[in-house]
Amino acid sequence: LRNHALFAALLGSGLRVSEVVNLDKDQYTGKGFSRVQIKGGVIRDCVAVHRDARKVLDEWLKARQDDFPALFLTRTGRKLSRREAYGIVCRVAAQANAHLPEDEKMDVSPHVLRHTFLRKLAETKGVHYAREASGHQSDRYIWRYVKPDQQTLAEAIDALE
């Protein structure tokens, strides 16, 4: 359940792995995370989380039977590290890829989940929403996240009349 919640939090918020593993339980509001320290030491008042990810986070917090403040813990009660979170995401991806043909296997990492979230947000709501969700101050950096992959680009070209 913890691994599913970690995956959901990364994919449903667009936060970096270091930002997610540094979250405490009391920062989760039921709609998102409050007072999140992002890259550069900046504090974001609110980070919205997708409804599907909130359901998983609610289940995770309901199942927790401890008083540790960290949102994501190891079995010994220590806050999960970036490296451990990376390993969890890679193991989940390996399980998902286990029965797929070689040409359909996905390359997944915590940062790929961030890119996926921001790209989907940009495609559905626009680049300004994605930039806001990314935490970047400038439009300059958002383009690397919303750049279409080769398959999406090929499909767009095929759709031209």
Image (cartoon, grey):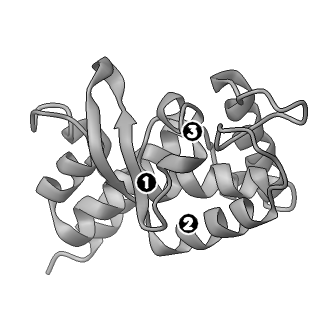
Q: Which residue is at 30% across, 58% downward?
A: 153
Q: How crowded is mark 3: few (under 14 residues within 10 Å), some or many (20 or more)?
A: many
Q: Where is residue 33 in the image (x, y as percent from the top left)?
A: 42, 52
Residue 127, x across and y down, in percent: 15, 55
Image coords of residue 152 (percent x, y): 36, 61
Question: Relative to 144, is 62 on the left or the right?
Answer: right
Q: What is the quadrant of the N terminus in the image?
A: bottom right
Q: Residue furthest toward the right?
A: 76
Residue type, numbered disc 3: Pro
Q: What element carries label 3?
A: helix
Name of the residue lying farthest toward the front: 67
Residue type pointed to by label 2: Ala
Tell me how many marks there are.
Answer: 3
Residue occupied by mark 1: 13
Q: Name the residue under label 3.
A: 110
Q: Nearer the viewer, residue 35 or 90?
A: 35
- Neighbor class of circle 2 (other Cα within 10 Å; few <14, some 14-19, many 20+) is many
**Residue 53: mark:** 2
Q: In this view, does 45 lie above or below 19?
A: below
What is the quadrant of residue 142 in the picture? Answer: top left
Question: Which amino acid type corresponds to the residue marked 1 in the rendered image?
Answer: Ser
Tell me how far mark 1 sits from mark 3, CA to CA: 11 Å
Q: Check whether the beta carbons of the residues at disc 2 and disc 1 lie within 8 A of each other.
A: yes
Query: Horizontal and vertical percent for residue 67?
Result: 76, 44
Question: Which of the two discs, 1 and 3, labels the residue nearer the N terminus?
Answer: 1
The residue positioned 68% from the left and 31% from the top of the image is 86
